Amino acid sequence: MALLYVLAGIIILLILILKKLNPMLALLIVSILTGLMLSMPPEKLMLSIGNGIGNTLGGMVMILTLGAMVGKLAEDSGGYSSR
């Protein structure tokens, strides 16, 4: 039964994104709905969502930081100026 709830969550997520809802908001809504369908206690549900978001953003920090540094170096060296 749990697998059906997860499958329903994926389908709802796809529908929300196709309806042009912000993907982050759609993911948050579907995460909450799926957790409630699986009878997770609200405290555990919010902790699980928070950990998932934290792990995802934590992995992106280095990429974003290095990208910003390369962009600043290119700007300072004149790499973005037009001739």
Image (tube, rainbow, N blue to C red):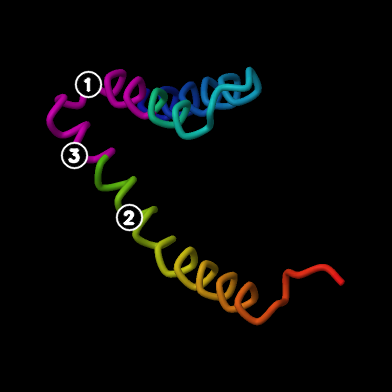
Where does residue 16 sit, x and y in percent of width and height? 56, 20
Q: Which residue is mark 2?
A: 55
Mark 2 or mark 1: whose residue is earlier in sequence: 1
- In the image, 57 versus 66, the foreground residue is 66
Cα separation, mark 3 vs mark 1, equals 14 Å
Q: Are marks 2 and 3 in contact (CB under 8 Å)?
A: no
Where does residue 56 sit, x and y in percent of width and height? 39, 53
Q: 2 left or right of 63? A: left
In this view, the mark in front (2 or 1): 2
Q: Which residue is mark 1?
A: 39
Residue, x 44% and y 60% (percent of image)? 60
Residue, x 46% and y 25% (percent of image)? 9
- In the image, 1 versus 83, the foreground residue is 83
Label 1 crowd (10 A; few <14 / some 14-19 / many >=20): few
Label 2 crowd (10 A; few <14 / some 14-19 / many >=20): few
Residue, x 20% and y 26% (percent of image)? 40
Where does residue 6 sit, x and y in percent of width and height? 43, 29
Mark 3 or mark 1: whose residue is earlier in sequence: 1
Q: Which residues are magenta?
A: 31-49
Q: Is residue 26 magenta?
A: no
Cα separation, mark 2 vs mark 1, equals 23 Å
User: Toward which corner of the image does residue 48 lie, by quadrant?
Assistant: top left
Three-letter amino acid code at the position of disc 1: Ser
